[in-house]
Amino acid sequence: MTSFCGCRESHNSDQKPVPWDRLWEEKNLAQTLTGAEGLTSIPALLHRNVTEFGSSPAYREKEFGIWQTWTWTETAKEIEALALGLINLGVNEGDFVAIIGRNRPYLYWSMVAAQMVGAIPVPLYQDANAEEMAYVLGHCGARFVIVSDQEQVDKVIEVQDQLHQFEHMIYLDPRGLRKYDHSHLHQYSHVQNQGRAARDEFINELKRRSEKPGYDDTCVMLYTSGTTGKPKGVVLSNRNVIESARSSSDFDQLRREDEILAYLPMAWVGDFIFSLGQAFWCGFCVNCPESADTMMTDLREIGPTYYFAPPRVFETQLTNVMIRMEDASPLKKRMFDHYMAHARKVGPDILDGKPVSAADKLKYRIGELLVYGPLKNTLGFSRVRVGYTAGEAIGPEIFDFYRSLGINLKQLYGQTEATVFITAQPDGEVRSDTVGVPSPGVELKIADNGEVFYRSPGVFVEYYKNPESTADTKDAEGWVATGDAGFIEESTGHLRIIDRAKDVGKMADGSLFAPKYVENKLKFYPNILEAVVFGNGREQCTAFINIDLSAVGNWAERNNIAYASYQELAGHPHVLDTIQSHVEEVNASVAEDDMLSGCQVHRFVVLHKELDADDGELTRTRKVRRRIIEEKFADIIDALYDGSPKVSTVTEVTYEDGRKGNIKATLEIRDAKVVPVVPQKVAAQ
């Protein structure tokens, strides 16, 4: 195995990497033993923030069209009242408290209040169905559940007979719940009021509990997305969370004046670190949008300085930009195309401080005035100082588009098991084809089969109630298997991820098969929402494609093409022609890569339905479940490879109310032109 440490100096191949534990011991032994600056828990950070800058804004939420703000002092009072109420309700040390709902200050406070009383918060995905929630609630044995509204209450009630340890549920929004049985159902504000009333009785007990947690005690339990099976409960300690928050904040020089928009799922480790870990470490303000529908408007109003989004969000925003430009006047369209071409040429260099001619700088400034500035303002990115994307690989064309506008968008590579951070891109070293260098304190190594391993202060404690999986993932020396295939550039120390290790394979001729590489290129086109490429062990690659209904629907409206459903639009001849042209353009691009030229798509089909998490085809974080898709659509895959021009299929779908049904379709299979090449075999690399 080759190995690289998080020290930038260790990228020199003549030096041996310094083990992460010795590195951190040498840096500050006291921090390793007692926590960064003596702070060993999120409640301890809260106390520091109140003491040092209690009047600064901590949380902000838009409700009924008005932004409401809570300072750190006000936030602490809200959290204390809820914590006292939880003790009054019977929450014990070591209990699991599930939290379900959209991003709201009250639910973030619930996680901190649970930690203050010695309980363990377990956030769940709010769009999970009742069955998925039943598994997580039953697996962790949650006695208490805090939810946002009636929808989540109904889901828990639907499966409560399966939850033998469940006792009480607390809800935030009372609308629609007046006639429910309230013997075990409590309004959030009432629990707080009861806590305030019982303050004298419980305040000493709360103080004892909140001061008790040590650096290696559990901070939170987060469940993985479950791409290959049931989700696993990842136990993260206070050390994991605080060290990761501290080192990542130092890496990007985050400060108290920064603003973020909290809109990603609270059950996702990234949101936990950004909206709790880093927010409490730095003391910056967390802004919660009014709803998913108003998110873009709220983003523009806040103008965050620190922003994170998975590739799908950036893809959607780019699609919306392209749709708007198609509807723009010819003059505006020409001006946009002209200045964007210049931005792609010099924008990233200007952003990184590299030499650019005076004429190019002047032209870029004019473009900033006429195009880039207004566009960034429309997207809500005018003030972004640090932007990140992660979760899955982003298409290089999409990544370069945003950087060309002058947005400091970077990539990071992480996992729940790493408390997010494995690698990140330093300013001035940002590239679309790497995920950066090891984050502070992280050590990397590449196994003989190409799989990436890491260890760091952020490495998770264990998978809850799953010692077998824990041992399979983390060895006795603390090395964690990522499941991703990649390599480290010797000259720069940057990590390049090829694909999921289990998805990387060989074509029948021995050439490399890496589906994600091709899928990301396809998804650059606004008309393509999702793509799944097949070909492992086969002579040729084929693909499933989902159209983007908003982009293609806009095109249909502009061309007076009527359609009654997604299925009808997806099968329209003009749509198929357009998608075929995109596939062939991608083939030409893929052919230029000697290592992956064998991954050109020979045949494709536009699916009759969108891949959906409710149907098990995607995870709740929108990752493709390849094995399930291969099983569910086996008849379509067979038709792609047997030369059939069409295929008739019946597919089970889940409706919004939970009912299941079937949809029938006859799909046209298209052949795509490929570029003749002689692909390199893996063995020759």
Image: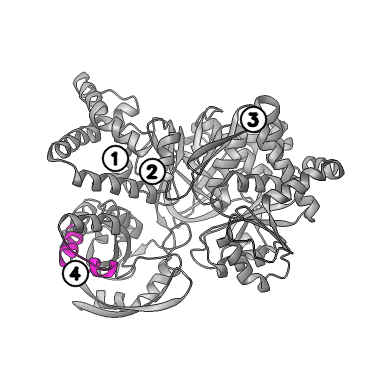
- The local secondary structure at tag 4 comes to strand
- Percent coordinates x, y for residue 38 in the rendering: 72, 32
- Percent coordinates x, y for residue 266 in the rendering: 55, 50
Whether residue 18 appears in this view of the structure is: no
Write down the residue under mark 3: 27
The numbered mark, 3 or 2, whose residue comes first in the sequence reads: 3
The numbered mark, 1 or 3, whose residue comes first in the sequence reads: 3
Residue furthest to the top in view is: 358
Residue furthest to the front in view is: 179
Mark 4 packing: few (<14 Cα in 10 Å), some, or many (20+)? many
Check if mark 3's residue and mark 2's residue have beta carbons within 8 Å. no
Which disc number belongs to residue 4? none
Write down the residue under mark 4: 670
The amino acid marked with disc number 4 is Arg
Number of dots carrying numbers: 4
Which disc number belongs to residue 434? 2
The alpha-carbon separation of the residues under discs 4 and 1 comes to 30 Å
Task: Verify whether residue 176 appears in magenta.
Answer: no
Mark 1 packing: few (<14 Cα in 10 Å), some, or many (20+)? many
Indicate whether 273 appears above or below 593: above
In front here: 445 or 519?
519
Indicate whether 641 appears above or below 67: below
Task: Verify whether residue 578 appears in magenta.
Answer: yes
The amino acid marked with disc number 2 is Thr
Point 73% across, 67% down: residue? 165
